[in-house]
Amino acid sequence: LAIATRNRYRQILETIVGKGFGEVRLAEATVPRVDRFLKRVTQENGPGSAKTARTLLQHVFALAVRHGAMRTNPVRDAGRIVQAKKAVTAPGVADIRAMRWVMWAYDHTPDKRGATRSAELGDLFDVFIGTGARTAEVLALRWADVDLESTPATISIRGTVVIGADGKVMVQPHPKSDSSRRTLLLPAFAADVL
């Protein structure tokens, strides 16, 4: 599993599953009890956390079944967790222009001490707009991923930035999923930034 996934599983296991289901004995882990627990997690923590909790319980009880501690896995027959999909709306041209202006203004406004900023958020924003890539994917780009010689120029998404187990930011050598590995054509303005 990816580092971010392991961290998320650990967090959900320690906070939600451990507190809400940690004292339940295997013999007490019935389908209705699991179902009530997952519904409560959905209401209190949202469907994303409930799905992760369900996955963790599914694995824990599967291990118990394999070792003969339980006859069946109660999670298998618990109700499904429904998560409404949000419509994705791309920003319009006017919104993009306004955002670019805000980034440019930040880059060209001295900080509290009067020093010139070195963040170059405007350039970073142009790469975001030009690629449509995830933030962590753009931040993980290396020069080996950029081909400015081809026509049009391209970048290859091969990794992502994650927070490691030690709390430090690092580049994971693969993106979020296998389908996230891709090569993107760069519009001229993004290629000019690079």
Image (cartoon, rainbow, N blue to C red):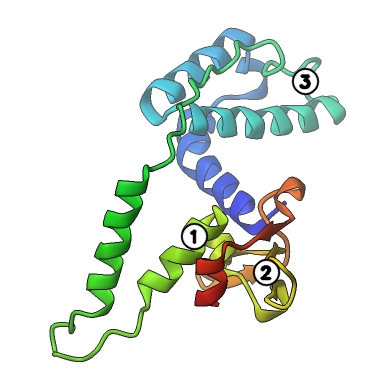
User: Residue 128 bears which disc, if any?
Assistant: 1
Name the mark nearer the viewer: 2 or 1. 2
Query: In what element is the residue under mark 2?
Result: loop
Indicate the amino acid at tag 2. Ala
Front residue of this view, candidates 65 and 38: 38
According to the picture, the residue beneath numbered tag 3 turns out to be 70
Query: Camera-side residue: 86 or 150?
Result: 150
User: Residue 109: x, y in percent?
Assistant: 19, 79
Disc 2 to disc 1: CB gap under 8 Å: no
Find numbered disc 3 in the image and state the secondary structure of the residue it sits on: loop
User: Residue at position x 70%, y 27% from top?
Assistant: 58
Q: CA distance from mark 2 to mark 1?
A: 15 Å
Which numbered disc, 3 or 2, marks the residue that appears first in the sequence?
3
Q: Residue 8 placed where, x, y %?
A: 55, 48
Q: According to the image, label 2 marks what residue? A: 153
Q: Amino acid at mark 3?
A: Met
Label 3, label 1: how many angstroms apart (C-alpha)?
Answer: 50 Å
Q: Nearer the viewer, mark 3 or mark 1?
A: 1
Q: Mark 1, residues whose alpha carbon is within 10 Å: few (<14), some, or many (≥20)?
A: some
- Specify the quadrant of the image occupied by residue 152: bottom right
Rendering coords of residue 12 (x, y %)? 52, 41
Q: Residue at x 51, y 32 (%)?
A: 48
